Amino acid sequence: MTTCKEQLQYSSPANGSWNLSHICSLMPQTHILFAVPLGCSRIIKLSALEKGIADRFWTLNIQNQDLVSGDIEKVIIEGAVQTIERLTKAGRRPRALMIFVSCIDEFIGCDHDVFLSELRKRYPDMRFIDGFMNPIDRHTDLPPIVNIQNKLTAFWERPKVVKAVNFIGSFLPPNEDNELVEYLLSYGYKTCHMYTRRTFDEYIAMGESALNIVTHPAGVYAAKQIQGRLGQAWSELFSFKTTDELIDSYNRICNMLCIPAPDFIKLKRQTSDYFIKKATEFSGCPIVISDSATIKPYALALYLLDMGFSVKMIFVQGPSPIDKPDMLRQKYPEVKIYNVDSPKTALIYKSRKYALPEAVAVGELAAYICRSEHYVPQIAFCEQPGFRALIKLIDQMEQSIKTPRPLEDIQIHGKGCCGL
Amino acid sequence: MNRLRMYLPNPAPDLDGASSMLFEMGGLVVIHDAAGCIENYTVYEEPRWFGADSLILSSGLTHMDAVLGDEEKLISQICETVEDFKPNFVAIVGSPVPYTLGMDLDGMAYEVQQRIGLPAFAVPCGSFDIYDTGAADALQRLIKCTALKDTIKKPKHINLLGALPMDFSSVQIAALVNMFKELGVTAHPFCMGTNFDDLFCIAGAELNITISYSGIKAARFLEKEYGMPWVYGFPCNKNQAEWLIKGHSICGADKFHCSKTKSMHCLVLGEQIVASSLAATLCKTYGWEAYAGVTMSFEKSIANKDTFHLEDEEAIIEALSKKWDIVIGDPLYRLLPNAEYNKWLEIPHAALSSHIYKDKELNEGLNDLSGMVYRFYEKSNFYF
């Protein structure tokens, strides 16, 4: 495996992931203002245009003279006021305004309390919050993707507790046929996710749910903050789990809700049987995986190999805090693991070094590097938990053999993956 | 200027223009950023990125690096990468944080050059300006650093300065080169379809034709250093190409005769030289009263009286409120208020709309753009 030493970084054209425009659109009846240098907001507006939600994203261009003028807060207040007044005049006054700043914010000493408190004073009927589009903090304790999850839940309120559970962390709700969702419903627990909230009030009411189920590690910080603020308990159910791990997680969640543990033994057996059957049908078809598709690429590879599939290569963009390759390396040393942040990746596609066009790729990054049109365009933030989700993944892999996709589609944000 | 932008995305930023200008030159281009800027570039601004082996990389700038001003880290990483890949040159492209902190990118480039013995330069971008300023800077610095060796004049060779995918598709540039070829002239479009070796002969050409704002700075540099004459204009038909070869600009004040005989009002929105060339050609060839509304960077010294700067969204909205028989521009402008009152000929401009309207890109009739516009209007085959 290539070491993850500090070096110049390659950026692949595979970019299925959600960006802030997609993420922020989860908050209903909210307008978003990007108070950033002109280049920083462009990708947001373009991807919002592609998604047809561009009217919710406005830009306030911060200029170089603002860096030294010392009145950046005043500039933001004026921009926000102009935004609200124009929206109000157009009959589109939002319930909340989210103001994003970018990497330079921390270096110019912008005081967010100054503009937030002034806006709250001027518009008491509205909510205001700041947001951070600051990849420079990617390697801190509060990277942007973690921070935004916290910001997105900041307005939740908890005047009472209702029989419902929230799913947070991933950007999509669990599938309706998810066995846990069905089971909880049988005990009267509805499931909530921001994706399905249509009004600001519905969104705020997520604070009334009995439990937050966190399906992506990026949501843990938010869950802890909510627990501290509202006393709302949380439990993790990270999206990829083996069948044994799933049983443990389900039991823990039900225990927290004081309902009997489910009996999913039959479903567990069915899932394992299905995997073994499909592994035979795949008959050695090579499989490649990238961490763009799953939060646990090594664990997924290990599980597939144990079931009889033929995983050949894994592509990662750096180390994962929750998934280590040790077990995989020990048990299946023949599986190659590559770090694709390295500059050498720039030459891989043209040189065909890892070309394996017959492979089934789980993730667009793996598809690109292996030049395979047989890929599942799953992204890690939309990965689904559960037995049935595991079965669905295998079905999607099988489908990708029958129905190849144009490889060029990987360049388009979220093309082909659910939710976008 | 109103800083609020409600309908349109900002044009591509300077650092993307700089990177794009250097893309085909076989150099190591390092964007000194936190890996967010490079993602914007590779996803939205660089149509050649898929399958490419260009060494455009991110420094992966971290908060701590920025606070501590750790320049040695980047210099070492660059030197290490140079050893592995043997690029033609090194360029360090700035981004908002280095710009804000006043990092000495020129100094770092100098240090790199001293250590590795390859040409190295910085392009001090900050994402506060748009793509054409970064591209213009990058081209001028690239030419400067290559220390031109071959200045022997090559008859019938010209340079096209300012070829950038944000303004032109590769098909457009190929058609342009072909148009000059048919006139017996070999055209070298910098930097689309040329390579690093071509740079060493750049001063040998008879003439520099600046086809977009991105080429102006390099043209002035070559004029100053090598006495090379330059003109500006994007030829919208063969007559215009001939006019340029003869050493005349297309859209300059007083240099191009327009006879406004017909009451046909046309507005061309977009990049300055392209928009004003098309407007001037429509005027010259068909007698239209055509104006160029420059929505990108504006160089006053080359603007004629029918070319005006629309520096923010409100200015474009106001311009659209006038009665035009036809407006030519990117489809995104149609999102603006007042746009619905006009007839439109949509010509995508990647600097504004990226790849969103790739399917509407012009691939035919490129050797007679003005004729295509005219015929299109005559057929009244517009999108309403």
Image (cartoon, coloured by chain):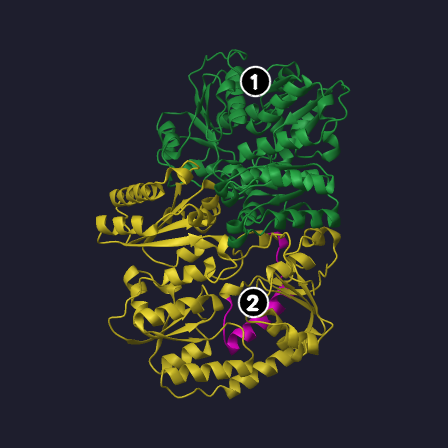
Chain colours: A yellow, B green
User: Mark 1 Cα within 10 Å, few/some/many (few <14, many 20+)?
Assistant: many
Q: Is residue B119 left or right of residue A376?
A: right
Whether the magenta-drawn stretch holds residue A398 is answered as yes
User: Mark 2 Cα within 10 Å, few/some/many (few <14, many 20+)?
Assistant: many
Name the quadrant of the N terminus of chain A: bottom right
Q: Are marks 2 and 1 in contact (CB under 8 Å)?
A: no
Secondary structure mostly seen in the magenta stretch: helix
Give the residue pinned by disc 1: B250
Q: Residue placed at 44% from the left, 55% from the top?
A: A22
In terms of secondary structure, where does tag 1 sit?
Answer: loop
Towards the viewer: B99 or A373: B99
Q: Position of residue B106 (x, y in %)?
A: 60, 37
Q: Position of residue A16 (x, y in %)?
A: 54, 57
Q: Residue placed at 78% from the left, 20% from the top?
A: B152
**Which residue type does callout 1 highlight?**
Ile
Question: Where is A403 relative to B90, above or below?
Answer: below
| Magenta stretch, residue numbers | A383-408
In terms of secondary structure, where does tag 2 sit?
Answer: loop
**Which residue type does callout 2 highlight?**
Thr
Marks 2/1 same chain: no
Cα separation between marks 2 and 1: 55 Å
Mark 1 — on which chain does it sit? B
Q: Quadrant of residue B211?
A: top right
Name the front one of labels 2 and 1.
2
User: Residue B351, can we see it?
Assistant: yes
Towards the viewer: A97 or A46: A97
Question: Where is B184 relative to A76, above or below?
Answer: above
Mark 2 — on which chain does it sit? A
Q: Position of residue B264 (x, y in %)?
A: 43, 19
User: Residue B26, can we see it?
Assistant: no
On residue A294, the disc is 2
